Amino acid sequence: MVQSPVQDYDPLEEQLNAWSHALGAGLAVIGAVFLLIKGSSLPLAQWIGLLVYALSLVLLFSSSTLYHFAKTQEKRHWYKKLDHTAIYYLIAGTYTPFLSIAIPTAKATYLLIALWIIALIGTLFKLVFIHRFQKISLAAYLVMGWLAVLVVDDMREFLGSDALNLLIFGGAAYTIGALFYALKKVRYTHAIWHLFVLLGAGSHFFAIYWYVI
């Protein structure tokens, strides 16, 4: 069967979409190596938490890159599912080092479990409804991201204000980017969203690299 090409964005914007997150994927791989080496003296369970975060970061940027480079309807359909479910994993994955390494409280453990349950439910939701309820999905991403307010005092106590500022900056970058993402009918807003994702992911990476391990 011949697979028909599908273009969701104009060619220039799609190139920006693809290459911006290809850059992110490359940086994520490099960052993951440095992160895992720096954390190599951690207990195994905590190092695995770092690994989960690193894999979620690489998955997010890689799946987005594959989706935006894909040229056929079938490939774009499956890569879009991977791309959108990877967002849930990045959110839960980013929380994992903070809640499993830096904050040794029962509240942090319960929140981490809840986040991964939400991520799994979100995965099932996206696999079934990839082209529907996108506003609900966007709201779910934002709510998951800002659940950090439940442990903000613990973060300030165990990590300090500088780490907290990086977390807030990253969260703000994702949130502002989401506003551009929602403007689907305006040209280049998706590419702008990608830049804010890079900014947010970078901010959270350095919060983990400098203050968690």
Image (tube, rainbow, N blue to C red):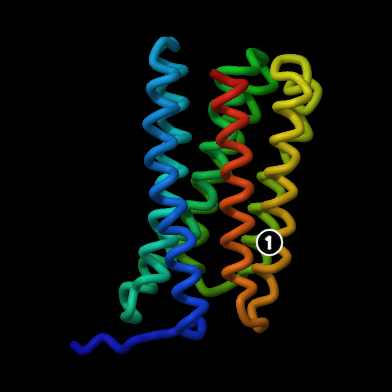
- Residue 65 location (% of width, % of height): 40, 62
Q: Residue placed at 66% from the left, 16% from the top?
A: 106
Q: Give, as a three-letter code, the residue at label 1.
A: Ala
**Looking at this rendering, what residue extends furthest in the left direction?**
1
Is residue 111 shown above or below 157? below
Quarter of the rendering occupied by the N terminus:
bottom left
Determine the image quadrant of residue 79.
Answer: bottom left
Is residue 40 shown above or below 182? above
Q: Residue placed at 58% from the left, 32% from the top?
A: 206
**Looking at this rendering, what residue extends furthest in the right direction?**
153
Horizontal side of 94 relative to 178 (left or right) equals: left
Foreground residue among 47 and 19: 19
Foreground residue among 134 and 40: 40
Q: Residue placed at 59% from the left, 59% from the top?
A: 195
Horizontal side of 29 relative to 139 (left or right) equals: left
Foreground residue among 87 and 163: 163
Foreground residue among 145 and 29: 29
Determine the image quadrant of residue 33.
Answer: top left
For mark 1, does the 10 Å Cα neighbourhood hold few (<14), some (14 to 19), or many (20 or more) residues?
many
- Residue 41 location (% of width, % of height): 41, 10
Q: Which residue is mark 1?
A: 178
Quarter of the rendering occupied by the C terminus:
top right
Is residue 182 shown above or below 30? below
- Residue 55 location (% of width, % of height): 40, 39
